[in-house]
Amino acid sequence: MASAREITVLIPGKLHPQTVERLEKTFKVRRIDSGDPALVDREAAETVRGIASSGLVNAAFIDAFPNLEIIANFGVGYDAVDAAHAAKKGIMVTNTPDVLTEEVADTAIGLLLNAVRELPRAEAWLRAGNWVGKGPYPLTVSTLRGRSVGVLGMGRIGLAIARRLEGFGVPISYHNRREVEGIGYRYFPTLRELAENVDTLISVAPGGAATAKIVNAEILEALGPDGVFINIGRGSTVDEDALASALADGTIRAAGLDVFADEPKVPEALLKLENAVLLPHVGSASQHTRDAMGDLAVDNLVEWFEKRRPITPVFETAHVKARD
């Protein structure tokens, strides 16, 4: 078996610096600007056995490497990787679950508090001198008191958010593709039913075709005029035009968003709204958590090439076996 230093791992595009540093100490690393097959030269095509990426790895890019064995995705969400195509070709795909759960859950609660209590606007009021010139910031209409919260996507992060919400004394419900055993939260079989029964919706849903624009005008209308929508999952799950309209015309009261459909571009219609709290996808963006994510991504590569098994395979490739 070849030593790790003889194995070529490709980094397409940007990657967390600490992760790159560790990869370079462990493997023979090649870098290109993006996951574009046109950037792959003949030597890379023949020698690359692993990919470490936080960006797009589509079918055409995968096909550019006949000896590719594993794609280590930096992040728990891996919708940018064509895992189904990788599975067909016997290529392992891994992600970085668990290590970012608590950080993202913290961010979700922060977004919720900011959206409900208008904390960014209150700070801007102070910084603009309005506290002195105009008096106290106006009383907020919204509060967490008396609210009911629905979680779209009761996985690891959804459960961590729900645990935090218990401390606020709010009733918690959820919608998943299927009911989760062993938890006491109320389950609704459809997202529409969930939205009709809560006034606060927190989305932790993954991306992909099955969830594209699942939060649409119908769901926002069901949430109601006191509704608050928080998205910490994927921007593709939301009809952003419908959301901007719902915020502008009072269909719902407020929103807090950390993710967008075409990042880093944020729709101008959302940027203009005072009742939208907008963050630049910082859910897991602490040094501590990003280092942990990078370590897990590298550990998956090391485990694969040394012991021929991954640590955290994604569902689609859990059956894939290492080649002899």
Image (cartoon, rainbow, N blue to C red):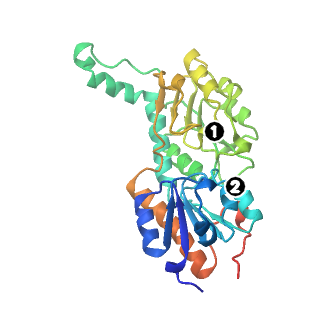
Work out whether mark 2 precedes mark 1 in sequence or the reverse, and give the earlier one: 2
Q: Which three-letter amino acid code belongs to the residue tagged 1?
A: Ser
247 vs 27, nearest the viewer:
27
In the rendered image of this protein, does residue 148 appear above or below residue 299? above
Q: Is residue 196 left or right of residue 147?
A: right
In the rendered image of this protein, does residue 121 appear above or below residue 281? above
Disc 2: CA contacts within 10 A as few (<14), some (14-19) or many (>=20): some
Disc 1: CA contacts within 10 A as few (<14), some (14-19) or many (>=20): many
Quadrant housing residue 301: bottom right
Report the Cα–Cα distance between label 2 and label 1: 22 Å
Which residue sits furthest front? 42
Q: Which residue is disc 1 drawn over?
A: 236
Give x and y (percent) for residue 182: 67, 56
Give x and y (percent) for residue 289: 44, 57
Q: Residue at x 71, y 65 (%)?
A: 317
Can see residue 312? Answer: no
Q: Residue at x 44, y 57 (%)?
A: 16
37 vs 114, nearest the viewer:
37
Q: Which three-letter amino acid code belongs to the residue tagged 2?
A: Ala
Quadrant housing residue 309: bottom right
153 vs 214, nearest the viewer:
214
Q: Residue at x 54, y 38 (%)?
A: 170
- Position of the C terminus, as image quadrant, is bottom right
Q: Is residue 201 left or right of residue 132?
A: right
Q: Which residue is disc 2 drawn over?
A: 60
Can see residue 267? Answer: yes
Q: Nearer the viewer, mark 2 or mark 1?
A: 2
Give x and y (percent) for residue 24: 44, 70
